[in-house]
Image: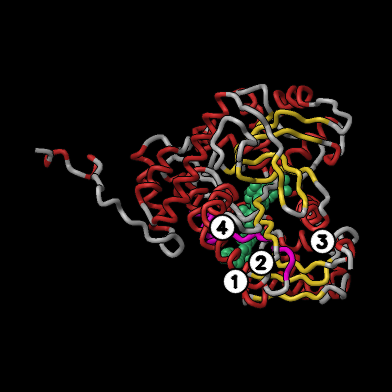
Amino acid sequence: MTNLEKKHSIIIAGGGSTYTAGIVMMLLENQERFPLRALKLYDNDGERQAIIGKAIAIELQEKAPEIKFEYTTDPVEAFTDVDFCFAHIRSGGYEMREQDEKIPLAHHVVGQETCGPGGIAYGMRSIGDIIELIDFMEKYSPNCWMLNYSNPASIVAEACRRLRPNSKILNICDMPVGTQRRMSQIIGLDPKDLEVRYFGMNHFGWWTSVKDKAGHEYLPEIRDYVAKNGYLTQVEVDTQHMDASWQATHKKAQDLLAVDPNYLPNTYLKYYLYPDYVVEHSDPNYTRANEVEDGREKRVFAAARKIIEAGTSKVGEFPIDSHASFIVDLACAIAYNTHERMLLIVENNGAIANIDDDIMVEVPCIVGNDGPEPITQGKIPLFQRGMILEQAMVEKLVVSAWIDHDYQQLWQALTLSKTLPSAQVAKEVLDDLIEANKEYWPELKQSPLHVNLISETPVESLA
Ligand SMILES: NC(=O)c1ccc[n+]([C@@H]2O[C@H](COP(=O)([O-])OP(=O)(O)OC[C@H]3O[C@@H](n4cnc5c(N)ncnc54)[C@H](O)[C@@H]3O)[C@@H](O)[C@H]2O)c1
Ligand SMILES: O=P(O)(O)OC[C@H]1O[C@H](O[C@H]2[C@H](O)[C@@H](O)[C@@H](O)O[C@@H]2CO)[C@H](O)[C@@H](O)[C@@H]1O
Ligand SMILES: [Mn+2]
């Protein structure tokens, strides 16, 4: 059987995810180019996963009975005889995302899923879980590739570099894919027509060129549009991001551009460049986690229950997440050596010439069956170099704090972040996050050289 005739076996880790159904429907749409022989779901919350699993079982029975389907909480069953693992777990679930967002906001600091103290807390929960998935995969299907988009992708990627440097794992993000879809709307092209140059880290980057296949440069035209409208587009391009909070984020790109009009910004830069604005426009009692629980999560699980109750997919409730087809692009590139060009999170190794080789950067790569080949982006300007070096050291300190179980390094990571105003506030946020994450984080040790903050020692006792 040639490679092109091979049918694949996929495991989706995080089967109870709000994205699983859309991705499975998208996989059914892509059977021509990426045929499946088996599909499994794996989750550590069997009850949550069963709702999605039962509905998908009905969908596949009616639409693709030839695909062997199962859902399980048993890692041996899940990871045996698989070619690809699509991983989208959420360590701690939405309950902890809410804490990641509300605890910092209670200290008038940015509360966000993947950025600032929220992203650091999420990273401290995710590292162990992702490494566990990699170890399951390597034990039961040694030739399997993990296409991971569990967040926080940047901290997870740095942890994989430190702890599993030789593993077959690619960390990916769909934010640039979504923003490039908006760019293609602005210039009237198809997203597939675009060839970009981009540099940064995950959720922390800039486009330096947006060309069509004929080599025409559209960045100036897009830049002029974004200077007036941000990335808001007239046509609805993204069902996920029509919520008011995400619309405001796309609009804010206007102010990100103002800081450096030469390059088109990733929307996530707003949390680092305008943290005060973000805090002023956040509701500390109702954050994005609550919006998703009231929105996407309710919609997806209601659709699944409707299919289960009807006993048929003819009630037609699961939308196809065609946006996620970039994951199939990546899987095809690995399986069929297609040399697809796409943004991936990879070890720098000179791709960005004037930052450290061991920083995990997000750059365009050519992907074949040996994995990604980064495309060099050259030297970057002082401003972006300073931003990236600082954020990279924050994330390296987080991973070291997880590995060493070390309080001091985690406090330093928060103190170094652009999203926090001082070491004092960083400590107050950290101590609250430690309390909230007791069942998830490793227990952190104080340095033997620990020095109390003056504010912890009443002044009168300072003899
Ligand atoms: N990289 C990207 O650009 C991108 C885009 C969208 C979503 N995401 C990420 O995808 C993930 C899923 O998002 P969601 O909103 O659907 O979350 P969700 O909470 O709806 O689903 C996550 C699932 O993972 C399961 N899970 C948690 N820990 C696990 C573990 N250790 N082993 C197995 N399963 C585990 C949960 O039980 C849950 O069913 C999140 O990490 C999210 O941030 C990333
Ligand atoms: O606030 P959420 O949970 O709705 O989204 C958080 C994720 O946002 C980005 O992914 C978006 C993507 O950029 C957009 O085009 C659309 O398809 O929806 C995706 C999921 O909402 C970001 O890249 C992820 O890392 C975030 O988790
Ligand atoms: Mn992302």
The image quadrant of residue 76 is bottom right
Q: Is mark 1 within 8 Å of ligand 1?
A: yes
Residue that label 2 marks: 16
Which residue shows up at 66% across the image and 65% down it?
13
Q: CA distance from mark 1 to mark 2?
A: 8 Å
Instruction: Please tell me which of labels 1 and 4 falls first in the chain.
Output: 1
Queried whether the magenta region covers residue 87, the answer comes back as: yes
Which residue shows up at 66% across the image and 22% down it?
261
How far across and down, in percent of the image, does residue 32 sit?
91, 60
User: Given the image, on which type of amino acid does mark 2 rest?
Assistant: Gly
Work out whether residue 21 or residue 159 is closer to the camera in this orientation and state it: 159
Residue that label 1 marks: 45
How far across and down, in percent of the image, does residue 75 sit?
62, 74
User: Given the image, on which type of amino acid does mark 4 rest?
Assistant: Arg
Residue that label 3 marks: 27
Q: Is mark 2 within 8 Å of ligand 1?
A: yes
Q: How many numbered tags mark residues here?
A: 4
106 relative to 217, above or below: below
- In this view, the residue farthest toward the left is 463
Kindly report which numbered mark, 1 or 4, lies closer to the viewer in this rendering: 4
Queried whether the magenta region covers residue 380, the answer comes back as: no
Residue that label 4 marks: 164
User: Given the image, on which type of amino acid does mark 3 rest?
Assistant: Leu
Dot 2: element: loop
Quick check: 410 left or right of 463?
Answer: right
Work out whether residue 36 or residue 72 is closer to the camera in this orientation and state it: 36
Which residue shows up at 47% across the image and 51% down it?
399
Q: Is mark 3 within 8 Å of ligand 1?
A: no
